[in-house]
Amino acid sequence: TASMVNISRLKIAFDNSCLFRAIGYCLENHMKSRGVEMIDVDSIDVASYRQKIATYVLENEGKNDFVCEPMLGMEPKEYAAWIVNPEKWGGELEMVIFSIILKIKIKAIDIQTGILYSYGEEQQDEKYEQDIKDDASNKYCSMVCILLYDGVHYDCIIRGSQTLFSINDSRAIDESQAVATFLRQTKQFTNVNDKSGSFQLRCLDCSQGLEHADAAREHATLTGHQNFSQA
């Protein structure tokens, strides 16, 4: 496990639902554990998080700039049916929607490049601020979920049992970036743009070579191994 100071990477199952599981876990653990005992990451109902995205798209078609065919890559109804398929991946668009639905900020660090992507700040308009004021039960508008992206997979950042961080916690971001730097230096990322023809992954648990991300997911399902890097 890559860890720096009190921040560490929590491994998420290497399947097609890692983004949904990572975000769901960060939110639910924050709500339920209160720093006492962490919940089981595998207990997260990823289907319900996929459904949140689908429902939002169906209810907001034509109401904003990205719930439309050019942004979704397909008609909203088609996308809503697509995203609930457990074999489909989530990515940047889904993080934008989650930041709106869950009223949290999401930061994702690309391990290969070190770039920190932020989702949710763009929603700080007057309507968003009014929604926060109207929703007195929402306690997460000033919280951030921090993810690590290795090119094909998402893990989440935790600090002990803490899974959401204050937007003012610059130390959490700095330490998360230090974790990403360590992972980059040890080549624990996948360069999906590698055109050399030698693109391959290696399981760090058993050293088995794997030809592509699908093979790594199958290997993870069969063995329970979750540590992969580009060979």
Image (cartoon, rainbow, N blue to C red):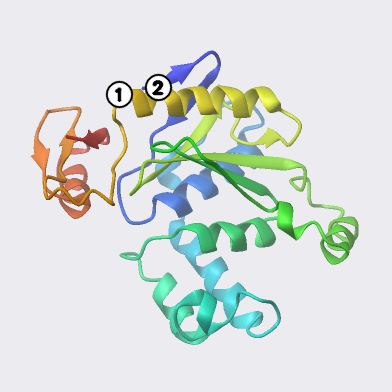
> Do residues under tags 2 and 1 come within 8 Å of each other at their CB atoms?
yes
* Quarter of the picture holding the C terminus: top left
Where does residue 85 sit, x and y in percent of width and height?
36, 70
Closer to the camera, 182 or 139? 182
**How busy is the neighbourhood of tag 1: few (under 14 within 10 Å), some, or many (20 plus)?**
few
Indicate the amino acid at tag 1. Thr
Q: What is the distance, in whole Å, between disc 2 and disc 1 at their CAs?
A: 6 Å
Which of the 4 image quadrants contains residue 183? top left
Residue holding disc 2? 182
Where does residue 52 sit, x and y in percent of width and height?
57, 67
140 relative to 73 in the view: left or right: right
Residue 31 seen from this side = yes
Where does residue 149 sit, x and y in percent of width and height?
42, 43
30 relative to 218 in the view: left or right: right
Q: Residue furthest top?
A: 5
Residue 177, placed above or below residue 140:
above
Which of the 4 image quadrants contains residue 59? bottom right
Residue 178, placed above or below residue 157:
above
Count up the numbered dots: 2
Residue 36 seen from this side = no
Where does residue 168 sit, x and y in percent of width and height?
76, 31
Q: Secondary structure at mark 2?
A: helix
Residue holding disc 1? 186
**How busy is the neighbourhood of tag 2: few (under 14 within 10 Å), some, or many (20 plus)?**
some
Indicate the amino acid at tag 2. Phe
Which of the 4 image quadrants contains residue 225? top left
